[in-house]
Image (tube, helix red, strand yellow):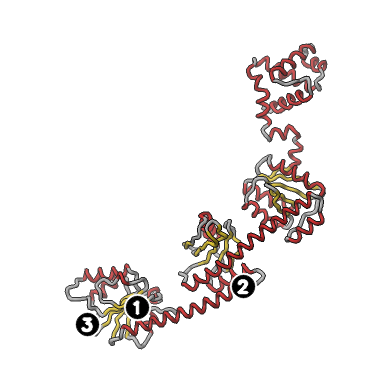
Amino acid sequence: MPATLRTLVAERSFAIRPLAAVSDDAWDRPLSWVHSSDLWDPAPWLEPGNLLLTDGAQFTEDRSDADVLAYCRRLRGADIAGIGFAVDVIHDRVPPALAEACAQTGLPLFEVGARTPFIGIIRFVADVIAAERVSRYAWLLDAQRAVAGAALRDDGLGEILRTLAIRLQTWVVLFDAKGSVVGSAGAVPDASDGGAGEQARMLLGRGLPASLDTEGEARATLQTIGRSRRLRGVLAVGNPERLDPAEKDLIGTVIAIASIALEQQRRLQASRRRVRSAVVEMLVAGRVREAQRTARAVGATLPEPPCRIAVATSWDGAVLEELENTEDRTGALFVAERDDRVILLMAEEALPAVTAVAEKRGIGVGVARLESWAGVEDGIRMSSHAANDVSGVAFYDDIADRGLIGALRTRGGEMLSRSILEPLATMDEAERGRLIRSAQVWLDANAAWDPAARVLGIHRHTLRARVAQLGQVLGLDLETFAGRAELWAALELARRE
């Protein structure tokens, strides 16, 4: 128990009594020390929480009420715990001006009677403070042993957080280097996920070791974990009351252990991701059984074909982590990295969850069907093609249904068509229309002159002249299949416009 005004007044060997009503906060505020002084301005030598003892030698007859009020205001500014005024030494009673000034400034005032020695009060408070320090030190050692024991259990990180929450009788939340919650304990308030999480991400964004206190309903103390530019996370501890040194030391112990645990977790996660990448390479190489056994070794399951194979080409660490979390929730999904892409093998029921991630993150995910393990490499190619088609989820089957012209339209083919046909823009509109109409009919007739000429109502030699003119203007050799195919594609893409 700390030394307070309540414990001091309760000590029967001292004749101390309050001269005015004292609030509960003032009664129970821990005393940092007891100082005696008759200086007119002792504030520079006082610290917050000090109790000032005086025999009143400074309160001479020439001191005005305004002087006394200024004296109390200086002490109030020093944030002392109160004034103990000894009577029957110089003054037979507490000066009324002092009592009035203390009441006006809210400064607790006590009468010290029966010639109570100041040294006795000082020694009493010093002994209580020393005993409290010994008690808190013993509490800290016991709590540190409990935390060390928790670290040796199967779920070491979770057990550490639970032990800390129990010892501090509050809630705790651990965030990783991305600001995602990796563990919590205690009754975490609803507001803490938003408030503390936002503050944690702000601290991580700075990249420097730091701490801060949040206010509001979910008040907490946040402390970064790790070194400058290598932060591993943030520990948030619910803090409705001010933490004492022993509690801060315990939090420091947890941060040290959590730092090691988070670093191990990061390395383990990196190793697991490398193994998952190897699983995909085994599937591409046709070593299906080895891939299945390796996947099970890292706690994953490969969905059996027929299923879906998907590729995400625009992603970052946060996207990968969310997809991995989706895998944990659904159990019908396998996530792995391959080069600059994320490969997803999933059962049909996992598709809605993956779609939700793609829409939330604004990434492109291409999806293809995987009928057998032999089609993994082709599935990756088809999915990659679909992933570049649109933002969100795109299915390769839909792109295939649109044919080559459909694929060209989604990849800027119309722009290329305009570039090919641009030389026609300088021609007379009627002449341009005749050339284009003639070429379309001729190509629709499989480049046969007589059938196309009959449809157009012109002689075949006239049609030949028009096609030759068109080829010359566009710079295409329409005597070859390649030239005719390029013209046909340009005209098809231009139809839409």
Q: Is residue 96 left or right of residue 246?
A: left
Q: Is residue 184 left or right of residue 293?
A: left
* Cα gap from disc 2 to disc 3, whole angstroms: 61 Å
> Where 122 falls versus 241 (above or below)?
below
Amino acid at dot 3: Ile
Asked if marks 3 and 1 touch (Cβ < 8 Å), the reply is no
Q: For mark 1, what is the residue?
A: 34
Badge 1 marks a residue whose secondary structure is strand
Mark 1 burial class by Cα count in 10 Å: few <14, some 14-19, many 20+: many
* Cα gap from disc 3 to disc 1, whole angstroms: 20 Å
Residue drawn 74% across the image and 55% down it: 332
Badge 3 marks a residue whose secondary structure is loop
> Which image quadrant for residue 232?
bottom right
Mark 3 burial class by Cα count in 10 Å: few <14, some 14-19, many 20+: few
> Where 8 falls versus 427 (above or below)?
below
Front position in the image: 370 or 193: 370
Q: What's the mark number on residue 150? A: 2
Mark 2 burial class by Cα count in 10 Å: few <14, some 14-19, many 20+: many
> Which image quadrant for residue 20?
bottom left
Q: For mark 3, what is the residue?
A: 90
Residue drawn 66% across the image and 57% down it: 270
